[in-house]
Image: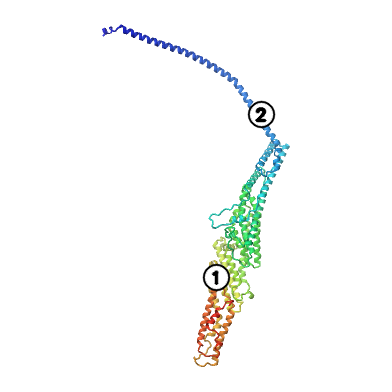
Amino acid sequence: MGVTSRMIPTEDASSRKREIEEKLKQEQETLSFIRENLEKSDQQTKGMVSILSSFESRLMQLENSIIPVHKQTENLQRLQENVDKTLSCMDHVISYYHVAKDTDRIIREGPTGRLDEYLACIAKIQKAVEYFQDNNPDSPELNTVKARFEKGKELLEAEFRSLLTRYSKPVPPILILDAISVDEELEVQEDVVLEHLPEAVLQDIICIAGWLVEYGRNQDFMNVYFQIRSNQLDRSIKGLKDHFRKNSASSGILYSPAVQTKRKDTPTKKAPKRPGKDDVLDIEIDSYIHCISAFVKLAQSEYGLLAEIIPEHHQKKTFDSLIQEALDNLMLEGDNIVSAARRAIMRHDYSAVLTIFPILRHLKMNKSEFDSTLQGTAASTKNKLPTLITSMETIGAKALEEFADSIKNDPDKEYNMPKDGTVHELTSNAILFLQQLLDFHETAGAMLASQETSSSASSYTSEFNKRLLSAYICKVLGNLQLNLLSKSKVYEDSALSAIFLHNNYNYILKSLEKSELIQLVTVTQKKAENSYRELIEQQIQMYQNSWVRVTEHLTNRNVPVFQPGTKLKDKERQVIKDKFKGFNDGLEELCKIQKGWAIPDKEQRDFIRQAQKRVVSEAYRAFLHRYANISFTKNPEKYHKYRPEEVEEMIEKLFDTSA
């Protein structure tokens, strides 16, 4: 191995050495370059540090110079702002001294037509007043602006009154009738809006009222409000009354809210006339009923309007004052109706009390709505309607009781008795009174109950009231029956008495059956119908007895026994002649008398005729057959005056004054 190494050429080693030396040289050059760059970098760093140090020093010097200047500038700005504020305040203060002059024209010309501008002007004056009161209370300017403020307030009050007066109009009667009518065919009733003031005017009034309350410290406008609106409410109701009377008088149309009118142009069926009832009174009653309904509707509408204008804690009191005049007029009219009924009772005109029933029914039907409308008003206001209702119930109950007594005590005057034995005026009037009472049975029952003091009456149930009314009707009918029986004795002819009682009893029964009166009667008297039928039958039998003195001539009584074909003795012939003559004379006399009597009920008239024809005809035919072959006279036509058919025709003409 050693021999081999030593054998490497010298030339390769030299070459290798040179390469190494060149590389070494390059590395030394690179190292020198790096050293130079590092030295330059150090020099630059030192230079930068020196510059930064110098810059920092200068900044500090600058800051020390600027900060005092900045502070001085801030102070100058603050001073400038203070000067501006002072000048502004001075201008503001000075403006207060010019307010009176600046607002003079606007205040003088008033708020009409420019309420917003006027209120802005008043606000300026008010601020001036506040300024002088706080800062210079002894200055003459304070008195000036105060006077100007009071003048402005005075003109606002005048504008409030003027707007209300100018635009408050009575509600047209047709609109009121629409508002109080009820259309039963409509499931949902259309709500008629009563617009009392134009919307723009209303907003101005609300605005003025708000200002007067908040800034004017004034409540006088509330008195102005209720006085003006009270007058319009009263005028609206009077206008309806006048319209109603005028139209009812000319057209005969009578509306009645008490029986739920449909529309203003749809009249309801009028109740049957009571004895002596006057058309004018009809109109007065229906007019009053309408006015009661109108008052409730208008008062509710007035409260809605008032609530927008008057402060809440003054609304009830103002409303109370507003409705007083109209309410008092209605109550006065109601009292007059009660007084008129009282005077009628004193004259024994009990039918006049029927005027109270539709009114009382309507008042009681509407009492809850009435009470709701008057909620929050004074006790004296709320008690007015109940007081009127009590008065009407008291006078009505008195009339009912006195009517029942009058039926019992009606005198038996011969000249007042119907000559033909027909229905007595007392009977027809009594039944008509009861029938009309039936139209108001709930009202009448409650009226009677209101006078009860027993513990059983404390609840005043509908069933209790019904029993009371039933007992009352039965009392009237009982009194009528007793009186009729007494009157029947005025007739000298017992047959005419029977016809008279028959006609009256039959009239009573048929009238009860045609109406719902019979249902009320049977609440107290279960067998009332049967009782009347028995009475009628008794009178028919009493009447038929009057024919006995005719038909007794057709019997065999007092007739001697004789053989047919044998010659009769004079006495026997005379007996037969007397029988024929007795029958003929009796028939003629009875038919002549009874032809002038009357049985108005055709069914009863025909029944009585047929029954009488059958009895008389059968007896007469048997009588004729018995003496057909017996010679008792030379002039048979003198005694055998009538054929059976002719007798039947004569009876057929009974109770027929036209025959």
Q: Amino acid at mark 1?
A: Lys
Are the two marked residues, 2 and 1, in contact with CB atoms closer than 8 angstroms?
no
Residue in front for this viewpoint, 40 or 474? 40
Q: Residue at x 55, y 70 (%)?
A: 510
Q: Which residue is mark 2?
A: 83
Closer to the chain start, of discs 2 and 1, is: 2
Image quarter for residue 82?
top right
Q: Provide the secondary structure element on which disc 2 rests.
A: helix
Specify the farthest residue to the right. Answer: 140
- Give how far apart the Cα atoms at labels 2 and 1 are: 110 Å
Tell me the quadrant of the picture where the C terminus can be found. bottom right
Residue in front for this viewpoint, 266 or 295? 266
Mark carried by residue 585: none
Tell me the quadrant of the picture where the N terminus can be found. top left
Residue in front for this viewpoint, 573 or 467? 573
How would you rate the neighbour count of disc 2 (Cα within 10 Å): few for under 14, some for 14-19, many for 20 or more?
Answer: few
Query: Is residue 321 shown to the viewer in this render?
Result: no
Residue 442 percent coordinates (x, y): 57, 62
Q: Amino acid at mark 2?
A: Val
Query: Is residue 405 shown to the viewer in this render?
Result: yes
Q: Residue at x 66, y 65 (%)?
A: 343
Relative to 247, 564 lies left or right:
left
Relative to 32, 249 lies left or right:
right
* Vertical order, 515 against 231 (above or below): below
Q: Which residue is mark 1?
A: 510
How would you rate the neighbour count of disc 1 (Cα within 10 Å): few for under 14, some for 14-19, many for 20 or more?
Answer: some
Q: Residue at x 40, y 10 (%)?
A: 28
Residue 50 percent coordinates (x, y): 52, 15
Residue 32 percent coordinates (x, y): 43, 11
Q: Provide the secondary structure element on which disc 1 rests.
A: helix
Relative to 411, 30 lies left or right:
left
